[in-house]
Image: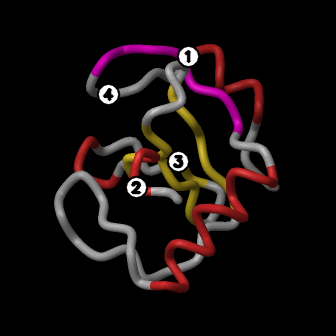
Amino acid sequence: MGFDLSCLSILCCPETQQSLAVADGSLLDRVNQGISRGILVNVGQKLVSDQIEAGLVRADQKVLYPIRENIPVLLIEEGIALDQLP
């Protein structure tokens, strides 16, 4: 991942201000499986269709924010609620 991990100390969830951590590979696999099956929508209620190479997960493990082209997309509506995962 090309995302600069030193930025994590200043980033937080735009909705709750909780801290964020880099999502591990197993979580990304589960999210990408959901995307492949066409079952995941983001908080803005749009179907998530692009696979995620990296992401930041909220401290409570309820929302994942994608990292696209090494840039975290920290918009509330772009978050993916993880309670959708089987």
Who comes first in sequence, dot 3 or dot 1?
Answer: 1
Q: Position of residue 9 (x, y in %)?
A: 64, 14
The residue positioned farthest toward the left in the image shown: 45
Q: Amino acid at mark 2?
A: Gln
Q: Is residue 67 above or below residue 18?
A: below
Q: Position of residue 76 (x, y in %)?
A: 26, 41
Task: Classify mark 4: residues with Cα within 10 Å, few (<14), some (14-19) or many (20+).
Answer: few
Position of 16 relative to 68 (above/below): above
Instruction: Specify the quadrant that holds the N terminus.
Output: bottom right
Q: Amino acid at mark 3?
A: Pro
Q: Choose between 19 and 73: the one closer to the eye.
A: 19
Q: Are marks 2 and 3 in contact (CB under 8 Å)?
A: no
Distance between mark 4 and mark 1 Cα atoms = 12 Å
Mark 1 packing: few (<14 Cα in 10 Å), some, or many (20+)? few
Work out whether mark 2 precedes mark 3 in sequence or the reverse, and give the earlier one.
Answer: 3
The residue under the point 57% across, 25% down is: 20
Kindly identify the amino acid type of the residue bearing the numbered disc 1.
Ile
Q: Which residue is mark 3?
A: 72
Name the one closer to the observer, 18 or 36: 36
Question: Which amino acid type corresponds to the residue marked 4 in the rendered image?
Answer: Pro
At 55% across and 20% down in the image, what residue appears?
Answer: 59
Specify the color scheme: secondary structure
Single out the mark in the foreground, 2 or 4: 2
Closest to the camera, between mark 1 and mark 2, is: 2
Q: Residues within 10 Å of mark 2 (few under 14, many from 20)?
A: few
Precedes in sequence: disc 1 or disc 2: 1
Rendered image: mark on residue 10:
1
> Is 54 in the magenta?
no
Q: Is residue 66 above or below residue 20?
A: below
**Measured Cα–Cα span from mark 3 to mark 4:** 12 Å
Q: Secondary structure at mark 2?
A: helix
Secondary structure under tag 4 reads: loop
